[in-house]
Amino acid sequence: SDQPMLETLSDETITGKEGSQLLNIMQTGQFAWMRQQIVPAMTLQGFDFAPARSSIPGLEPVGDDFMRTVFRELQTGDVGVAPSIDRSVYYVVKIDSRIPADDEQWTIVRNNFLSGQNDAAQDRLGGEMLSSEIPNWGDELFRKYDVQFISQEQPEE
């Protein structure tokens, strides 16, 4: 259908049967996977503007699975399904647009990053995203190769 998703699904029900609860359809507007916190946390090193996962008004809290689907698996124009953080709600998502919108703009962003024209927040964000993608890699490696540590007890004096 050439109609917008809001119009196409406006009379659809959860079960697809007449008399059932209507689907709750909304347009979220633009959002990012991560956002810079407005109010910094105070640490021993000073203020910490650690990035945080974005919340999306009108949606149950969403986690990295939702964001991964939206930002990595779907392209502009694609429709997919993404879960809330506790998987109690699943959202049908359509990607209307991206920023940057095209390969040329992404190349500029990528080149700026590779040339070091990034800031500490971008460095921290990259590290946090990497650590969330590869949690406990050491434990997985030890399990894979059946590494066992032998504890050495200290003799009592």
Image (cartoon, rainbow, N blue to C red):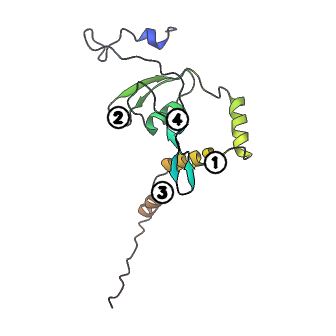
Residue under the point 44% across and 8% down: 7
Amino acid type at image mark 1? Ala
Please give the residue where the numbered disc 2 appears in the rendered image.
87
Q: Quadrant of residue 109?
A: top right
Please give the residue where the numbered disc 1 appears in the rendered image.
120
Q: Position of residue 106 (x, y in %)?
A: 68, 33
Label 3 or label 4, whichever comes before in sequence order: 4
Amino acid type at image mark 4? Trp
Q: Secondary structure at mark 1?
A: helix
Disc 1 versus disc 2: distance between alpha carbons? 33 Å
Which residue is at the front of the view, 113 or 140?
Answer: 113
Foreground: disc 3 or disc 4: 4
Please give the residue where the numbered disc 4 appears in the rendered image.
33
Label 4 or label 2, whichever comes before in sequence order: 4
Disc 1 versus disc 3: distance between alpha carbons? 25 Å
Q: Is residue 89 above or below residue 1?
A: below
Q: Is residue 106 above or below residue 97?
A: below
Q: Secondary structure at mark 2?
A: loop
Disc 3 versus disc 4: distance between alpha carbons? 23 Å
* Rendered image: mark on residue 137: 3
Amino acid type at image mark 2? Arg
